[in-house]
Image (cartoon, helix red, strand yellow):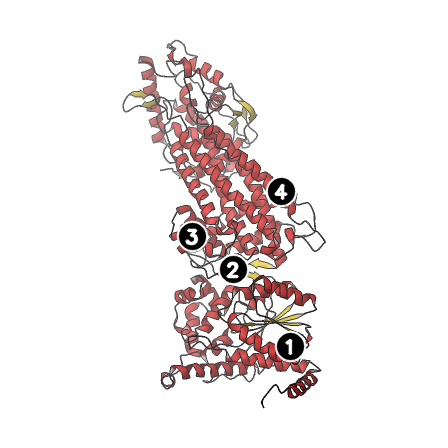
């Protein structure tokens, strides 16, 4: 196992955190995260594992004996096409000549972190015990890592059959013939003292793909963070366009259980606080691919991430040098383990998979620019005529995506015949590693563009994701740093800020909630809420007023509604309350898991709901419900048949409505709003259409312009627009279960158009509540196969009365109608 130990003295000397564990290289258990931490100097190496160092020493001694008594490639022979030329024991500078000739890397010097990653990988590989290299090389490499110094390594010099040039430069640095870069070294530290290498050491040192592997580890770590952050960005975009959670439902991905897709869907549910089985969407039947196909496109990238990590972990801990020196067999095995096909193909696969997710990000960016999805101005522009908003971000993201596409071209398609035809194939894994590093730079910019647009859309729509959810945390972090100005202006700095922020968004989907497990390994721990409109302040008529009946004549649902009203609840909490009111008889006896399932939320959301009501937890709320809302006496229920019970339930609902009307102020206010609107649109779809039609029929006798809205879809939006253009200031909506999504969308559209929405609904916690300015609740009966709506109908008539009171000519209009009806003989009595 990879061991960890502390070295407080050295930590204090170079200013690193003394509490951070050191990493001990042992040739068996180096991981990607260890390479990255060593490269970024977040951890420092301890002394090499003694057992592994002893194994390396035995291999060195074995190699020395074998080279002295027989032909061993690169030790007693030349290399490449020179393999047929023998090197005698007297040719002591053969090793140095090999290093000097191969240290011809070209191009710009590599960043220090890439070189340190190479050093960590190479030192660990040598400890696997198959190189036959003197142990002093391992010690010197570890010393360089510890000090922060690194050899100057140029970029180009390999084709995926060994990083020969980079490692030859490293070898020359170790013997003192090549410069070290000390710019990142700890204060007072210097490069390792020069060591001696002989003819047995040179090829053993350079026969490795350590630079390729180190760069691959760094690229993998960064892209893994960006893939994680991309889910948080996608979640914000989904909220901004009012998208559906159905595409992430657990049954969908259990039916085709690719691990990556299952994980991607679970992470999206965690970010959004969606339950495993989300309720049917209130918006579009099917979202664009950028949202709907996210698990199927992001999932392969997660699978490719895991596949690449498996390959790298094997390579980090492999004795892949040619020849393999076996001290057990006292033999040198010549082979082709230096050929990096596994690494090259895994890198190519990884880049192509990440590219697909980047294309999806640009698709979501396009959706955010489209009014049909956001109900905002094109390109999220400000009110100025022809405002361009984020238009240019599509071009910028497209350009970055184009660069990303270019460097995602499979490196393994390359071909080379080298060294006089002896080496007739090349994997080009080294090119693949460099390409993968560059992919990360472009991907970061693409996601930055989407994040800027998503936050802008949320701000314009006045939506703030629940701050308890990971998506809410992401929005809060972005809101802290992104410029809130909406006028047309350069967005270069906005994207730069967003791109830098992405690392902080990584891993948010793995947060546990309410003591639940980490969702990175399980789909539990999902928080419930979705989003809370900023500044939402829906007025709701309350039963908690003087004169409200509280005795046995008040129904269980009335008692429940009275308990919930007056609390500022999130949309998910209102959903729970609505479910309990609808199932009032069962509510006091439901477990939190059962209630969560019925309401379509997570169990932790039920717990938070109870706390929001002032209870210590759900058990305390349930006990309270059993005390204040007990089941109706069995004797009373037994005396009625099912039809009588349904009537009795409606009588209870009417009693509760009477309690609400003890305070007439909300109805009076609603009557004035409706009377002042010219025209007055009245909305009612499906089950509520009869209520809306009945209200409109009578209202038209006293109001000069009543417009019944009984069609959904785009026709509804058109008629709302027409009413607004004609001068409407308010809209009356009747909303009854099951609440059509067209009604919810229509109310949202009406409010965005500037209309004041008055809603008659079955409870103050119905889905329409968040899109209403004034909500008047009237419960429906649920005792028969189809709901009964006596209370909503009566409340509609009460509203008519209040509207008549607010219309000065209402009486005259009624008298005029009666006179004309009599003249025409409309009625028989």
**Circle nearer the N terminus (4, 3):** 4
The residues tagged by marks 2 and 4 sit, at their Cα atoms, a distance apart of 31 Å
Would residue 1 be seen by someone viewing this image from the given angle? yes
Where's residue 131, x and y in %?
A: 37, 24
Q: Residue furthest left?
A: 329
Q: Position of residue 607 (x, y in %)?
A: 45, 65
Q: In the rendering, at what x and y percent does residue 246 appear?
A: 46, 57
Q: Residues within 10 Å of mark 1 (few under 14, many from 20)?
A: some
Q: CA distance from mark 4 to mark 3?
A: 38 Å
Residue furthest right as drawn = 385
Residue topped by disc 1: 669
Q: Secondary structure at mark 1?
A: helix
**Dot 3 or dot 1, earlier in sequence:** 3
Q: Nearer the viewer, mark 4 or mark 1?
A: 4
| Residue wearing tag 2 | 530
Q: How far is disc 4 from disc 1 in space, using C-alphas?
A: 50 Å
Rendered view: 52 above or below 94? below
Reading the image, the residue beneath label 4 is 395
Specify the label residue 120 is tagged with. none
Q: Judging from the image, what secondary structure is the residue with disc 2 in?
A: loop
Q: Residue at x 58, y 89 (%)?
A: 828
Looking at marks 3 and 2 on the same chain, the residue that comes earlier in the sequence is marked by 3
Residue 220 shows in the view = no
Q: Which mark, residue 518?
A: 3
Mark 2 or mark 1, which is nearer the start of the sequence?
2
Mark 1 to mark 2 CA distance (whole Å): 31 Å
The residue carrying pointer 2 sits among few (fewer than 14), some (14 to 19) or many (20 or more) residues within 10 Å by Cα, namely: many
* Secondary structure beneath label 3: loop
Q: Nearer the viewer, mark 4 or mark 3?
A: 4
* Residue found 59% across the figure and 65% down from its top: 716
């Amino acid at each position: 196992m990879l061991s960890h130990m502390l070295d407080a003295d050295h930590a204090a000397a170079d200013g690193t955190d003394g509490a951070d564990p050191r990493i001990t290289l042992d040739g068996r258990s180096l991981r990607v995260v260890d390479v990255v931490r060593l490269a970024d100097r977040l951890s420092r190496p301890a002394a090499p594992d003694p057992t592994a160092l002893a194994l390396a020493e035995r291999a060195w001694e074995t190699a020395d004996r074998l080279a002295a008594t027989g032909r061993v490639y690169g030790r007693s022979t030349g290399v490449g096409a020179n393999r047929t030329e023998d090197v005698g024991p007297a040719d002591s500078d053969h090793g140095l000549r090999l290093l000097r000739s191969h240290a011809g890397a070209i191009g710009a010097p590599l960043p220090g972190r890439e070189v340190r990653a190479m050093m960590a990988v190479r030192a660990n590989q040598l400890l696997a015990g198959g190189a036959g290299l003197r142990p002093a090389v391992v010690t010197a490499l570890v010393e360089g890592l510890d000090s922060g110094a690194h050899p100057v390594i140029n970029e180009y010099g390999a084709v995926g059959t060994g990083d020969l040039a980079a490692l030859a430069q490293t070898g020359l640095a170790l013997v003192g013939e090549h410069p070290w870069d000390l710019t990142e070294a700890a204060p007072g530290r210097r490069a390792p003292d020069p060591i001696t290498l002989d003819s047995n050491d040179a090829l053993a040192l350079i026969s490795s793909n350590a630079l390729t592997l180190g760069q691959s580890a760094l690229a993998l770590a960064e892209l893994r963070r960006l893939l994680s952050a991309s889910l948080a960005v996608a979640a914000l975009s989904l909220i901004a366009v009012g998208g559906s959670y159905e595409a992430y439902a657990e049954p969908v991905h259990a039916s085709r259980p690719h691990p990556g897709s299952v994980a991607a869907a679970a992470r999206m549910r965690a970010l959004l606080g969606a339950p495993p089985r989300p309720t049917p969407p209130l918006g579009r039947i099917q979202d664009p691919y950028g949202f709907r196909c996210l698990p199927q496109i992001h999932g392969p990238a997660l699978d490719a991430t895991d596949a690449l990590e498996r390959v790298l972990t094997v390579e980090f801990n492999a004795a892949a040098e040619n020849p393999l020196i076996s001290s057990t067999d006292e033999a040198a095995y010549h082979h082709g383990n230096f050929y990096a096909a596994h690494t090259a193909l895994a890198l190519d696969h990884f880049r192509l998979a990440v590219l697909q997710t980047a294309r999806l990000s640009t698709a979501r960016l396009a959706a955010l620019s489209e009014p049909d999805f956001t109900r905002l101005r094109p390109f999220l522009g400000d009110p100025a005529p022809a405002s361009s908003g984020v238009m240019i971000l599509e071009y910028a993201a497209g350009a970055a995506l184009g660069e990303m596409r270019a460097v995602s071209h499979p490196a393994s398609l390359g071909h080379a015949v080298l060294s006089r035809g002896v080496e007739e194939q090349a994997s080009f894994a080294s090119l693949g590693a460099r390409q993968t590093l560059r992919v990360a730079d472009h991907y970061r910019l693409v996601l930055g563009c989407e994040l800027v647009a998503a936050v802008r859309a949320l701000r314009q729509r006045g939506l703030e994701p629940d701050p308890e959810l990971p998506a809410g945390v992401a929005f809060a972090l972005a809101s802290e740093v992104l410029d809130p100005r909406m006028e047309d202006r350069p967005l270069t700095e906005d994207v730069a800020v967003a791109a830098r922020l992405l690392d902080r968004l990584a891993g948010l989907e793995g947060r546990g909630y309410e003591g639940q497990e980490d969702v990175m390994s399980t789909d539990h721990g999902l928080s419930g809420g979705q989003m809370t409109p900023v500044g939402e302040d829906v007025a709701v008529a309350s039963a908690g007023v003087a004169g409200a009946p509280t005795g046995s004549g008040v129904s269980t649902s009335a008692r429940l509604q009275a308990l919930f009203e007056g609390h500022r609840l999130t949309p998910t909490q209102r959903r729970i309350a609505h479910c309990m009111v609808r199932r009032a008889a069962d509510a006091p006896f439901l477990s939190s898991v059962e209630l969560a399932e019925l309401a379509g939320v997570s169990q932790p959301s039920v717990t938070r709901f109870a706390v929001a009501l002032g209870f210590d937890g759900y058990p305390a709320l349930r006990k309270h419900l059993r005390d204040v809302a007990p089941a109706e006496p069995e004797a009373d229920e037994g005396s009625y048949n099912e039809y009588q019970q349904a009537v009795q339930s409606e009588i209870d609902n009417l009693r509760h409505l009477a309690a609400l009307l003890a305070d007439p102020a909300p109805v009076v206010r609603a009557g004035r709003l409706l009377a002042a609107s010219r025209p007055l649109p009245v909305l009612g779809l499906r089950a509520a259409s009869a209520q809306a039609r009945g209200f409109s029929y009578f209202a038209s006798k006293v109001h000069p312009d009543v417009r019944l809205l009984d069609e959904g879809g785009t026709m509804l939006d058109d008629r709302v627009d027409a009413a607004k253009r004609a001068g409407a200031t308010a809209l009356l909506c009747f909303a009854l279960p099951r609440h059509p999504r067209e009604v919810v969308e229509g109310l949202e559209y009406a409010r965005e158009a500037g209309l004041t929405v008055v809603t008659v609904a079955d409870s103050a916690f119905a889905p329409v509540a968040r899109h209403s300015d004034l909500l008047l609740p009237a419960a429906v009966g649920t005792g028969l196969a189809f709901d009964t709506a006596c209370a909503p109908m009566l409340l509609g008539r009460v509203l008519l009365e209040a509207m008549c009171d607010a219309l000065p000519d209402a009486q005259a209009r009624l008298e005029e109608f009666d006179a004309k009806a009599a003249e025409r003989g409309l009625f028989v009595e």
